[in-house]
Each structure stands twice: as C-alpha cells, then as structure tokens.
Image (spheres, helix red, strand yellow):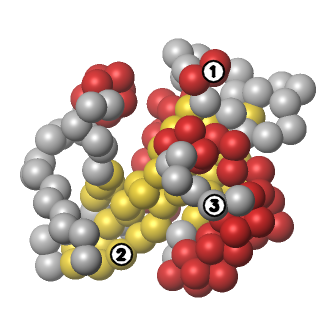
C-alpha cells in the first residue's frame, strides 16, 4: 500500500522525476526547485507524493493550491497530478486524489477542480471514476 504525504520545501526536489513525465519542458532539477520554492509556494502551492516501500522518491505527485473566485467560492485546484508510467495502475493517483479531497474538506473548500489535456483518456477515466464531472472547457492563449 502506498504511503502518501506532503512534501516540505526542503523535499521539493523529490517531486522532479515524476513531474518531468507530465511537464517535459521543466528546466533542470535545481531550477525546478527554485521556481516552486521561491515563486509557487509563496502563492500557496503545495506538493504531495505517493511513495512505494523501498523507493526514496515519490512515484506519483500532485501539486495543488487553494483560492477564491466568484464562480466556485473557496476551492482547491489541482495544478499537477502524475504517476510515473512504470507505476500506473497501482492506485497512486486515486490515493492522491483521496488525500486531496480530505485536505479540501479540512480546509473548508467548497469544491475541487483540475484541468486535463484532451488527449489524457486514462486520466479522464480516473477522474470520472472519482465522481468528478466535466463542467467546462478551458481556453488559453499564448502571449
């Protein structure tokens, strides 16, 4: 059974290998740690990892934050959720989502939200199995 726990700022580097699979454009590990710890964490970004026994780094990671807006009230937003390919199908992502749902409850959030690339069919299946709903289309524009 996986062990799920939050990563401290001094452990941010542990998330790099997993997040690199989801975000292959990431800079070096050192630049990643600098961005997360100096820019994202001060804005409320947090990291949680799912660990398998005998493996020092998490094999699955989620990055999330809370916020307020007029549409959702107080919410928890999942920015990143990834399981390394070799460890998929072992319950890591589902376990991370359960941890996140509990965290949202404890914080008093009204909703949990995330965006997922249209090509990520396996992820969509997981989210639907987790009783999440497709509630909108997300639009973006490069500037």
Residue plotted at (27% across, 31% down): 119
Label 2, on which residue? 67
Q: Nearer the viewer, mark 1 or mark 2?
A: 1
* Residue 22 in view here: yes
Q: Earlier in the sequence, mark 1 or mark 3?
A: 3
Give the structural element (helix, strand or loop) at label 3: loop
Residue 27 relative to residue 102: left or right: right
Q: Nearer the viewer, mark 1 or mark 3?
A: 3
The residue furthest top is: 89
Which residue is more in the foreground, 93 or 121? 121
Residue plotted at (62% across, 74% down): 35
Residue plotted at (76% across, 27% down): 52
Asked if the residue under mark 2 is in contact with the one under mark 3, i.e. CB atoms within 8 Å, the reply is no
Label 1, on which residue? 87
Q: How many marks?
A: 3
- In the rendered image, which quarter contains the C terminus? bottom left
Residue 127, horizontal then vertical, whole percent: 31, 33
Residue 129, horizontal then vertical, whole percent: 30, 24
Residue 74, horizontal then vertical, whole percent: 30, 73
**Position of 28 relative to 116 (above/below):** below
**Position of 11 relative to 96 (above/below):** below
Q: Residues within 10 Å of mark 2 (few under 14, many from 20)?
A: few
Q: Earlier in the sequence, mark 3 or mark 2?
A: 3
* Residue 3 in view here: no
Q: CA distance from mark 1 to mark 3?
A: 23 Å
Q: Earlier in the sequence, mark 1 or mark 2?
A: 2
């Amino acid at each position: 059974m996986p062990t799920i726990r939050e990563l401290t700022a001094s452990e941010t580097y542990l998330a790099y290998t997993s997040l690199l699979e989801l975000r292959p454009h990431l800079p070096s590990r050192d630049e990643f740690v600098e961005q997360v710890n100096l820019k994202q964490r001060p804005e409320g970004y947090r990291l949680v990892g799912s660990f398998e026994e005998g493996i020092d780094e998490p094999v699955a990671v989620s990055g999330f934050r809370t916020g307020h807006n007029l549409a959702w009230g107080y919410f928890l937003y999942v920015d990143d959720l990834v399981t390394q390919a070799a460890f998929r199908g072992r319950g890591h992502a589902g376990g991370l989502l359960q941890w996140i749902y509990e965290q949202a409850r404890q914080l008093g959030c009204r909703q949990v939200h995330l965006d997922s690339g249209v090509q990520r069919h396996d992820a969509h299946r997981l989210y639907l199995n987790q009783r999440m709903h497709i509630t909108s289309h997300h639009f973006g524009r490069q500037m």
